[in-house]
Image (cartoon, rainbow, N blue to C red):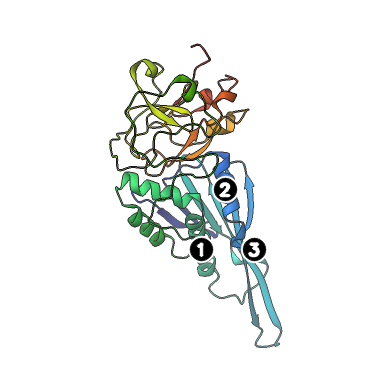
Amino acid sequence: MLSSVAKRGVYPLHASRLGVFRMPTEITAASDISSITNDLRSSGFKIDSYADRIYLTYKWTESTVDPQTQEELSADLYITVELVTGEVIDLIYQIKPLEFFGDPYWVRNYRQKADQNAKMIIDTVIRNSIIGDKLITHYQKFEKLSREAAIKKLEDISPLAKNPKTRTAAMPPPPSGPSVTAKPTAPSLTPPPPPALAAAGGSGGDTTISLTGSGTNYSKVDGPIDPCFRSKRQGVGTYQGIKVWGPIDPPGQLGIWGTEVTVDFDICVADGACIEACPVNVYEWLDTPGHPASEKKPFMIREKDCIFCMACENVCPPQCVKIFQKGQ
C-alpha cells in the first residue's frame, strides 16, 4: 500500500458493504494487544478479543413517531469493526442490511450512519491506543518527519476519534524512579569500571551513560547479534550496573547491553517476545526515545536471576539476544 492508512474500498458484498483499512504497524505481542483493549475500555464500545483479533462494537438507537398512528418507534442498531493484528494491522467492518435488525423501514440514511460510526471507531482506535504511537514512530523513521509533524499527520487521519488522546511534540523523558535512575552525563568512552562494579546490576547499580543526546550515528542493523562481540567491542560504561558495549551515540546508536543476558539494542525492534518468554522476569521495558529501531528496549535489569533456559534467545524474531553462561 502506498499510503500510511489506506482505504482499500467500500464494496457491495451480498447486500452488505465492506470497508478495509490497513496500517503499516506491527502488533504481535500479547502485551500490545492487551494494551489496545485497556486503552479503549472507556470508549463506550463493546470489546471482545480472541487470539489475534479484537472486535469493537458501537450501538446506537434510531427513533421516530409514526405519522399515521402517532406510535413511538425505535430500533437498536450497531456496527462492528474487526481489528486483525500481525505484521500489519487490518481494520475491517461490514455494514449489515437494515433488514437484519427487523423491519425498521422508517430509518433514514442507515448506511451512511453505519459507515460514519465505523470510521469513528477506527479513528478512535488509531488515535487512542498504542497503534497511534507506532504510526508516529513509522512516520519519523520512514518519512523522516519531525515528531511534531508526525503527530499532526496522525491527527489528520483520525478526525472522528472520540475523546482523542493528546500527544505532545516533546519527547517522553527517560524512565525515572528508584529502579531506573540515569544521570544526565555524556556517553563515557573511558575504560569500563572494575568487574565488581559492573556486576552490581539489577538493583539500581552504577550508571555512567545516558540514553539521551543528539547523536544520529545509526544505520539499519540486521540480526543476528554478533556472538563474538565481546572480543570486538569495548565496554563504554554501565546503566544501573548493566554493562554496555560500544560504540554508542545516543539516541541513534545504543550498542549491546549485558554481560550474560545480552541484547543488541540497535537490532531490537521491541516485539516483546523475550519478555513474555522469560520464566524468571529478567527483563523489563526501558524507554529509549529517539532510537530509530524502536523507542523501548528489553532491559536485563535482573540479569543475575537468569537460569540460562535460552527461551528468550530462541524466540527473538530479529535474533538480537545472546545468552552466555557464566564462564563462557
Residue 222: which quarter of the image?
top left
Query: As rendered, which of 97 and 119 lies closer to the eye?
Result: 119
Earlier residue among tags 2 and 1 = 2
Reading the chain from its start, which is encountered first: label 3 or label 1?
Answer: 3
Tag 3: amino acid:
Phe
User: Residue shown at 54%/49% (left/top)?
Assistant: 83
Marks 3/1 in contact by CB < 8 Å: the verdict is no
Q: Is residue 250 left or right of residue 96?
A: left
- Disc marking residue 35: 2
- Residue 116, image x and y in percent? 50, 66
Please identify the residue farthest to the top as the structure is shown.
327
Q: Which mark is residue 120?
A: 1
> In the image shown, does 272 or 81 lie closer to the viewer?
272
Occupied quadrant, residue 318: top left
Question: Neighbour class for label 1 at 10 Å: few (<14), some, many (≥20)?
Answer: some
Tell me if 260 is positioned left or right of 216 in this view: right
Q: Residues within 10 Å of mark 3 (few under 14, many from 20)?
A: few
Amino acid beneath label 2: Ser
- Distance in Å between CA atoms under marks 2 and 1: 20 Å
